[in-house]
Image (cartoon, rainbow, N blue to C red):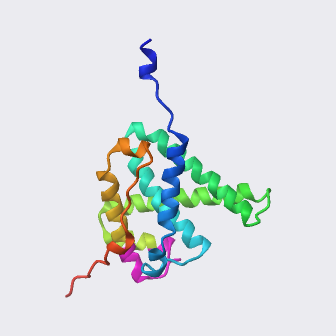
Amino acid sequence: MIFPLFRRTPPRPDSISVLYGMIVAQARLPAFYRDYAVPDTVKGRFELIVLHLALLLDRFSEEEALRPLGQGIFDRFCRDMDHNLREMGVGDLAVPKQMRRMGEAFYGRAQAYRAALAAGSDEALAAALARNIYDGKASPGAARLAAYMRETVGALSRQESARFAHGDLRLPEPTAVVEPVAPRD
């Protein structure tokens, strides 16, 4: 029969777990907390997971074939956040409300980062990062994190789509990204 050739194969669950695990591992790298001054708190770690997830899902949204994989990774993120809330002692009745807040936070940040990246302005991107990751305070880490984000977008765009389906994800080493030098007057 020819019909099986035209069926979409759902993403492999192991690829979803591997890709999500790589996002979480990247977000936990000590360099972000040491060199980029991201607060080493539950919120700071959540923000870095959201940042990496948003960049990856934006890359996946560019290709129809990657969208189911992106949805699977987002669903895995939601299950992980639910599990983490419960481990932190959030009661069963409060989990849905907290999950809604996390979802709103994800979509808001993803939209802000997407708009700042599209604008091409490092200042706009650093401002979005300062607002979300550094609690609205000016931080020298925001400019470096903006440079890291641009490097990550470039790295994701250069990766072949088929490799993602096999759980292959290459993200930049944060220590290799240097803070941009501001032009002198």
Give the quarter of the image for residue 5: top left
Q: Name the foreground residue: 61 vs 109.
A: 61
> Residue at point 28% right, 77% down?
180
- Lateral position of residue 63 relative to residue 68, left or right: left
Q: Residue furthest top?
A: 1
Residues drawn in magenta: 130-145
Residue 141: image x %, image y %?
Answer: 41, 79
> Residue at point 39% right, 83% down?
140
> Residue at point 64% right, 60% down?
101
Name the quadrant of the C terminus.
bottom left
Asked if 165 appears above or below 148 in the picture, the reply is above
Residue 27: image x %, image y %?
Answer: 49, 66
Q: Name the foreground residue: 59 vs 102.
A: 59
Q: Does 158 lie within the magenta span? A: no
> Residue at point 77% right, 66% down?
89
Residue 156: image x %, image y %?
Answer: 35, 54
Name the quadrant of the N terminus.
top left
- Lateral position of residue 35 relative to residue 77, left or right: left
Q: How many numbered marks have been drawn onto this rendered protein structure?
A: 0
